[in-house]
């Protein structure tokens, strides 16, 4: 339900439901100055800012991420697999003295393999998954090497 200035009825409906909802035992309001919780102008509980708890990589996760990265997985693939942001993955690799490159397909042999996979009939997303890179990387290399791109009607 959207809250806009044009329709304040939505806000009133939400307030009615909130007053009738059972309270959570963890809801507390502190009188301390450093508290993040306060009562707003409507007498409702509000927060000054949203605080997210940072997730930390465990030692075993870091070891497996390092091994997978060195075997060719990209930070994008690892971030999706482990549920962290790609910058978190990248920063942890750098902390362990691993050079993080922006490009996983750097040699001519890798580019030739990418082109041959695409020309054999694989889709760009399938080639990307096979090589452990983002599909936009595959597209860029195909275009840079003058490969004729298929349309969706060519499949």
Image: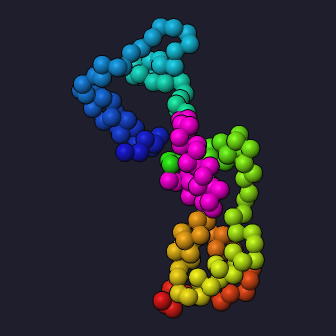
- Residue at 43% x, 41% y is 3
Residue 22 seen by the camera: yes
In the image, is residue 54 part of the stretch drawn in magenta?
Answer: no
- Number of numbered discs overlaid on the protein picture: 0
> For residue 30, which quarter of the picture?
top left
> What x and y, as percent, mark residue 19?
28, 25
The residue under the point 75% across, 51% down is: 99
**Residue 136 versus residue 146 in the image, above or below:** above
Asked if residue 87 can be seen in this view, the reply is: no
Q: Is residue 22 left or right of residue 49?
A: left
Query: For the N terminus, which image quadrant?
Result: top left
The magenta region covers: 55-81
The quarter of the picture where residue 128 lies is bottom right
Does the magenta stretch mainly form a helix, a strand or a loop? helix
Residue 81 in the image: state x and y as whole percent. Answer: 50, 53
Residue closest to the eye, 15 or 149: 149
Query: Does residue 71 show up magenta in the picture?
Result: yes
- List x then y, in percent, for residue 113: 65, 80
Occupied quadrant, residue 7: top left
């Amino acid at each position: 339900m959207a809250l806009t200035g044009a329709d304040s009825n939505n806000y009133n409906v939400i307030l009615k439901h909130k007053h009738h909802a059972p309270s959570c035992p963890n809801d507390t309001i502190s009188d301390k100055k450093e508290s993040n919780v306060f009562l707003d102008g409507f007498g409702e509980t509000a927060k000054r800012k949203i605080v997210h708890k940072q997730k930390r990589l465990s030692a075993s996760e870091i070891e497996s991420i390092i091994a997978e990265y060195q075997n060719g997985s990209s930070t994008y693939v690892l971030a999706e697999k482990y549920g962290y942001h790609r910058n978190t993955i990248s920063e942890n690799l750098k902390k362990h003295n691993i050079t993080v490159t922006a490009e996983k397909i750097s040699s001519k042999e890798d580019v030739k393999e990418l082109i041959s996979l695409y020309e054999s009939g694989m889709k760009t997303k399938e080639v990307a998954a096979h090589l452990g890179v983002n599909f936009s990387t595959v597209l860029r290399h195909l275009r840079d090497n003058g490969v004729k791109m298929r349309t969706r009607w060519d499949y």
